[in-house]
Image: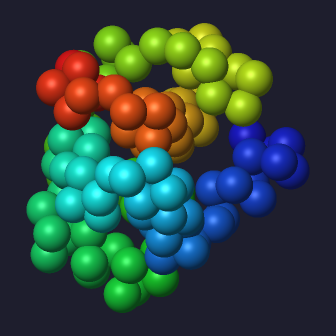
Amino acid sequence: MNNKPHNQVFGMKFENIYPLYVQKAERKNRTKEEVDQIIFWLTGYDQAGLQQQINQGNNLETFFAQAPAFNPNSSLIKGVVCGVRVEEIEDPLMQKIRYLDKLIDELAKGKAMEKILR
């Protein structure tokens, strides 16, 4: 786990990434609420828990480590993010990060919520 690109990603603050997810969704006429719904589904956070992660300035590693209930259906998430198939990512933390990226991509591409939330 000592390769540098992973460490840089893991250390990124969730509070900095979150607005990018929301902006990506809103550019495609989706909502912050839909982004939150995806995060809640994937991680088990609720609104208060999500806000606490943002307020505490936690990085992605901590955000996912403290997730109350990572969704067992996340293994159904398939496809390519940043040129990598999410189902083939070996590092568990990187895979969780890419799962979230993939779900936000699907939202931005206009996929129905019931299809995104497998």
**Nearer to the camera, 116 or 65:** 116
Identified at 24% across, 52% down, the residue is 34
- How far across and down, in percent of the image, does residue 30 sit? 33, 51
Identified at 65% across, 65% down, the residue is 11
Give the image quarter of residue 86.
top right
- How far across and down, in percent of the image, does residue 104 sit? 44, 42
Please give the count of numbered marks on the rendered protein: 0
Q: Residue furthest front?
A: 29
- How far across and down, in percent of the image, does residue 12 sit? 64, 66
Q: Is residue 23 left or right of residue 40?
A: right
Q: Is residue 60 left or right of residue 75?
A: right
Q: Quadrant of the C terminus?
A: top left
Compared with 71, 37 (above or below) is below
> Can residue 103 be seen here?
no
**Nearer to the camera, 65 or 28:** 28
Compared with 81, 41 (above or below) is below
Identified at 16% across, 26% down, the residue is 114
Q: Quadrant of the N terminus?
A: top right
- How far across and down, in percent of the image, does residue 87 sit? 52, 13
